Image (spheres, rainbow, N blue to C red):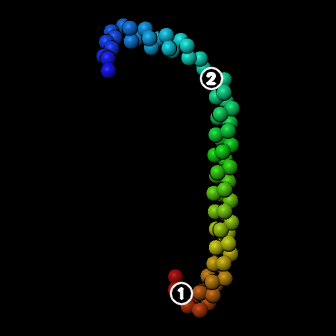
Amino acid sequence: MDKIYISKEEMWTGIKQEAKQLKPSNNAPILVFFVFMWLIICLLFVFIPFVIISTVFLVLYIPFYFIDNLLFRRRK
């Protein structure tokens, strides 16, 4: 394997030439749109079941709350 020595100035000129060749991408807004849509869809798949399960637990718990208060008559 050969060793290659470059000076600091050569390195900086090469970096500047590469930076000039790079152009900003016009696809960024489309990519951001798809990422946000993916995030919203994933959150819906998490949030909707959470709300449904919480509502079911609440509906199932309410009768037992009243039964518990009638049977044990806890002092407050």
- The front one of 30 and 59 is 30
Q: Secondary structure at mark 1?
A: loop
Residue type at mark 2? Ser
Above or below — where is 70 with respect to 50? Answer: below
Q: Which labelled disc corresponds to residue 25? A: 2
Mark 2 closeness class: few <14, some 14–19, many ≥20 residues within 10 Å: few
Kindly identify the residue that appears in the image at 50 percent across and 14 percent down.
18
Q: Locate residue 54, reporting x and y percent.
A: 64, 68
- The front one of 50 and 68 is 50
Single out the residue that lies furthest toward the front. 1
Q: Locate residue 7, reporting x and y percent.
A: 33, 9
Nearer to us: label 1 or label 2: 2
Image mark count = 2
Q: CA distance from mark 1 to mark 2?
A: 67 Å
Kindly identify the residue that appears in the image at 63 percent across and 87 percent down.
67
Asked if disc 1 and disc 2 are in contact, CB closer than 8 Å, the reply is: no
Q: Earlier in the sequence, mark 1 or mark 2?
A: 2
Q: Which residue is mark 1?
A: 74
Residue type at mark 1? Arg
In the picture, which quadrant includes the N terminus? top left
Above or below — where is 9 with respect to 65? Answer: above
In the image, is 5 to the left or to the right of 66? left
Kindly identify the residue that appears in the image at 66 percent across and 45 percent down.
38
Residue 62 appears in which quarter of the rendering?
bottom right
Kindly identify the residue that appears in the image at 67 percent across and 30 percent down.
29
